Image (cartoon, helix red, strand yellow):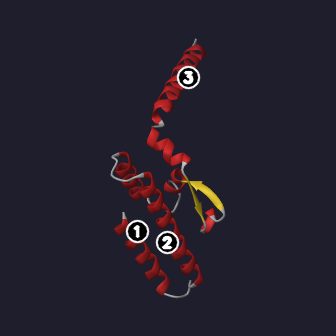
Amino acid sequence: LIAVKTSDKDTVSAAGEKDGDSPKEEPWEKALKTTVVDMEVGEFRGHKISVWDLLHSKYIPEENRKELLELYQAGELTLEQVKMVVSTIVTKAEAARAEQSANASSPRAETTVAEAEDTHLQED
């Protein structure tokens, strides 16, 4: 009997999750997943990557991602603007990271990262 109850519960939750996923992918979300950017920096060099994946990469802090998604969903940012902002953030973050590793012994490298962060926060 316990196995049957567990099985019924699993079926219900699996069906519930499946139903939850279909409407969950909104048109705006699908657009972000199907729009690709050709990035020429860091781990993305030479690859086409979706705006969605860029948004969820290590380069975009969670608070920035949430803000960009909210503005995009509200229609305050176009898909093209979101694409440009995330591309710029990733490019600047990677440039700052590359410079920091090149000047690892230099105290100026830390300043560069802080400047890059300040710049991308102002752009958002």
**Which residue is located at x 44 percent, y 43 percent?**
28
Q: Residue tagged by mark 2?
A: 92
Q: Is residue 13 left or right of residue 121?
A: right
Q: CA distance from mark 1 to mark 3?
A: 45 Å
Q: Which mark is residue 120?
A: 1
First in sequence: mark 3 or mark 2? 3
Residue 58 image point, x, y percent: 52, 60
Q: CA distance from mark 3 to mark 2?
A: 46 Å
Name the amino acid type tagged 3.
Asp
Q: Is residue 37 left or right of residue 28?
A: right
Circle 2 SS class: helix
Query: Above or below — where is 121 with respect to 77?
Result: below
Q: Residue tagged by mark 3?
A: 10
Circle 3 SS class: helix
Are the residues tagged 1 and 2 within 8 Å (C-beta)?
A: yes
First in sequence: mark 1 or mark 3? 3
Q: CA distance from mark 1 to mark 2?
A: 8 Å
Q: Residues within 10 Å of mark 3 (few under 14, many from 20)?
A: few
